[in-house]
Amino acid sequence: MSIEYIEYIVNQISNLFQELEYQIEKNKLEKVEIDFPKGVIRTADFYRSRLTFISDEVLKTNIAYHLMLSDVYRWILNRFKIYLVAKEMLIKEGISLFGNILEAVLLHTAKLLKPDKEKIGFSKACTILVEEGIISKEMKKELKWVWSVRCKEHLASLPEREYGKYKLEDYNRTVLIWQSLEEKLRDAKQHGKI
């Protein structure tokens, strides 16, 4: 299939989407469901099989569900022209989703490493993983960057408007941070560190 043909299909779909939206509004329809493409959202089993470093099966499954949602974000961000604030907020939500996943994974791992510690937060969990030689200080900085974006979910505490704050590069950076942590934790599990 040529690039020109793909561009033709994209143009046709865009026009049909716009016509569909017009007809929905014209006919005052509340709901119309379009089939989401099959194969885009990977299965929970796929993700669970990657999370070998998580010993809690409930947590492993819940993380898998959130990673499935990340497939939806990835697809939307790579398939739709969404502009300005709406695009930025979608990017922010995608980063926040990974922030939640990272928090769960880091806290779980830190508690495995230091079961005697009662209260472990995000930053302390990162410190424990650095001290145990599982992640570098640089990775800790990267993880804390994701967490700083995640914490901006608390809208009442934001000192300024969020416009112009989030780019697709930020989302891609977050995915790479997650993948790097995932690899380091798999390696640590394989070598008996966790």
Image (cartoon, rainbow, N blue to C red):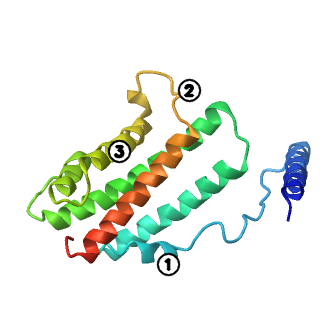
Name the residue carrying label 3.
142
Q: Earlier in the sequence, mark 1 or mark 2?
A: 1
Residue that protrudes farthest toward the left in the picture: 116
Distance between the alpha carbons at the discs numbered 1 and 3: 28 Å
Q: Image point 56% across, 26% down: which residue?
A: 163
User: Picture coordinates of residue 180 (x, y %)?
Assistant: 39, 58
Query: What residue type is disc 2 on?
Result: Tyr
Residue 92 visible in the picture: no
Which mark lies nearer to you, 3 or 2? 3
The image quadrant where one finds the C terminus is bottom left
Name the residue carrying label 2.
163
The label number, if any, that marks residue 45 in the structure image? 1
> Is 130 on the left-hand or right-hand side of 82?
left
Q: Earlier in the sequence, mark 3 or mark 2?
A: 3
Q: Nearer the viewer, residue 120 or 78?
A: 78
Residue 150 visible in the picture: yes
Q: Is residue 138 above or below residue 45?
A: above
